[in-house]
């Protein structure tokens, strides 16, 4: 398959300009995706764009990742019902320092024919003067044209409306495309489907001021089969930074993928071949209880984001925490089990409590749960009473129960289970 057919088979072409398939066949296309530094880490909502850029490079085309130090000063209204909180220049620079290595992780900068680039659009946007920008960029767009864009139109219908600041975002992104066209011969901008209006504005600007035809391609916005927003777990974003989302939690997110979503995610987020994914789809139909497709998805994406060594560590941690091995074995096994749990503590949700607290009468289970999972005492009590808490494989439903050092595995560590999917290692020191 050529690249366009590959993207279509993977379900990654939501919309595209006419002639893009021919461009992929006839020339080396330079393409870009922008990533605004709205946080100190990218998250898996950004992952589709990163993998798509990497896929494009593997087909011999040239990828550019924009770290949006300029547009990040404004904030993209696309997909937002309210005005974004403006970040300070210091915050943006700190975020850029964090996300640039994440962008670089997916791209190859040493390929002789099509090396990747990471650029910061503040390099040109920050030096624009207002009058020059209005004359050279703003004059090419009517207000009527801008009002027709979904990102603007939707905000106009909201109670808060849209500020002139965010209204101008479309012009800044159009200017990005023009700058990349002039500097690097970039002829393709990609993004999520909510970016189509911004992308076509850049296409229109280049047509008007350079008389050239360039292209746009947008991927679908990823959701789950249940309709939930992709990339959330227990209400929190899944970050690429392992200090914000532990590697074991990252792997677990993919491992818990719904059967209805897993084949689509294998196509979106991995480099497995069509035959490999077809085989996994057949296994999913014949033996869904084995969850082989989910295991391959979790291993592939965790390796892609965190590397093979850390992916293996995350898998080992999950096997220990969620495997069939019981923790209530013989006393002789306790030192080995404790050593294993302590070895993975840095890779899983964990905390440290003072060993002396567990001497004498010990610590009440409600207090223990509250401290371990950073919950209120009332929430911890409710979890215990509802039967949602196990300590070292022992269900505890009595909120008046207490834990002593003798209850810890080898006197050194506890494993707390909250429901069926959450595990916490508590070290005694």
Image: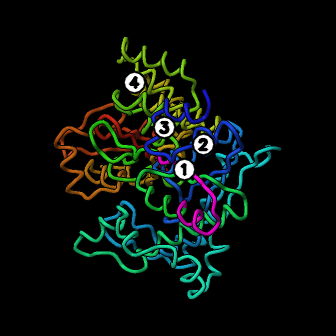
The x and y percentages for residue 121 are: 62, 68
Query: What residue is shown with label 4?
Result: 326
Between the residue at mark 3 and the residue at mark 4, the CA separation in whole angstroms equals 22 Å
Between the residue at mark 2 and the residue at mark 1, the CA separation in whole angstroms equals 8 Å
Is any atom of residue 404 visible in this view? yes
Residue segment shown in magenta: 203-218
Query: What residue is shown with label 2?
Result: 306
Please name whichever residue, 245 or 378, is drawn nearer the observer in this view of the structure.
Answer: 245
The circle on residue 396 is: none
* Disc with the residue nearer the chain's start (3 vs 1): 1
The x and y percentages for residue 310 are: 61, 39
Between the residue at mark 3 and the residue at mark 1, the CA separation in whole angstroms equals 11 Å
* Disc with the residue nearer the chain's start (4 vs 1): 1
* Disc with the residue nearer the chain's start (2 vs 3): 3
Q: Secondary structure at mark 1?
A: loop
Query: What residue is shown with label 3?
Result: 251
Q: Secondary structure at mark 4?
A: loop
Q: Is residue 66 magenta?
A: no
Q: Residue at x 45, y 35 (%)?
A: 11
Please name whichever residue, 359 or 263, is drawn nearer the observer in this view of the structure.
Answer: 263
The mark total stands at: 4
The x and y percentages for residue 306 are: 60, 42
10 Å crowding of disc 3: few (<14), some (14-19), many (20+)? many
Q: Residue at x 42, y 50 (%)?
A: 193
10 Å crowding of disc 2: few (<14), some (14-19), many (20+)? some
Q: Is residue 386 above or below residue 141?
A: above
Between the residue at mark 4 and the residue at mark 2, the CA separation in whole angstroms equals 29 Å
Q: Residue furthest top?
A: 286
Between the residue at mark 4 and the residue at mark 1, the CA separation in whole angstroms equals 28 Å
Please name whichever residue, 184 or 322, is drawn nearer the observer in this view of the structure.
Answer: 184
Q: Quadrant of residue 126?
A: bottom right
């Amino acid at each position: 398959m050529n690249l366009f057919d590959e993207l279509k088979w993977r379900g990654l072409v939501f919309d595209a300009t006419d002639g893009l398939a021919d461009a992929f066949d006839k020339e080396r296309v330079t393409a870009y995706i922008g990533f605004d530094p709205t946080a100190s880490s990218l998250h898996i909502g950004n992952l589709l764009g990163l993998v798509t850029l990497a896929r494009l490079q593997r087909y011999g085309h040239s990828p550019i990742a924009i770290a949006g130090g300029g547009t990040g000063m404004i904030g993209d209204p696309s997909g937002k019902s309210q005005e974004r909180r403006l970040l300070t220049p210091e915050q943006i620079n700190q975020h850029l320092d964090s996300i640039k290595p994440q962008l670089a992780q997916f791209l190859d900068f040493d390929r002789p024919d099509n090396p990747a680039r990471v650029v910061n659009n503040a390099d040109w946007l920050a030096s624009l003067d207002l009058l020059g920008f209005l004359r050279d960029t703003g004059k090419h767009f009517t207000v009527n044209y801008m009002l027709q864009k979904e990102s603007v139109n939707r905000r106009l219908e909201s109670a808060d409306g849209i500020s002139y600041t965010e209204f101008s975002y479309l012009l800044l992104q159009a200017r990005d495309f023009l700058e990349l066209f002039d500097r690097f011969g970039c002829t393709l901008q990609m993004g999520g489907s909510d970016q189509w209006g911004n992308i076509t504005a850049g296409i229109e600007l280049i047509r008007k001021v350079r008389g050239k035809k360039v292209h746009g391609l947008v991927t679908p916005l990823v959701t789950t089969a249940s309709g939930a927003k992709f990339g959330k777990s227990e209400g929190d974003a899944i970050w690429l930074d392992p200090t914000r989302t532990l590697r074991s939690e990252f792997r677990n997110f993919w491992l818990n993928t719904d059967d209805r979503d897993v084949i689509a995610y294998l196509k979106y987020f991995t480099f497995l071949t069509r035959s490999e994914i077809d085989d996994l789809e057949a296994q999913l139909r014949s033996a869904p209880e084995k969850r082989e497709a989910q295991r391959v998805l979790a291993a592939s994406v965790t390796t892609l984001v965190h590397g093979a060594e850390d992916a293996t560590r995350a898998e080992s941690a999950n096997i220990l925490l969620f495997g069939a091995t019981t923790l209530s074995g013989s006393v002789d096994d306790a030192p080995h089990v404790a050593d294993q749990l302590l070895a993975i503590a840095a890779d899983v949700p964990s905390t440290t409590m003072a060993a002396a607290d567990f001497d004498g009468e010990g610590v009440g289970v409600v207090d223990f749960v509250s401290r371990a999972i950073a919950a209120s005492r009332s929430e911890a009590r409710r979890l215990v009473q509802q039967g949602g808490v196990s300590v070292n494989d022992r269900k505890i439903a009595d909120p008046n129960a207490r834990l002593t050092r003798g209850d810890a595995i080898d006197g050194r560590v506890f494993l707390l289970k909250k429901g069926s999917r959450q595990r916490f290692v508590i070290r005694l020191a």
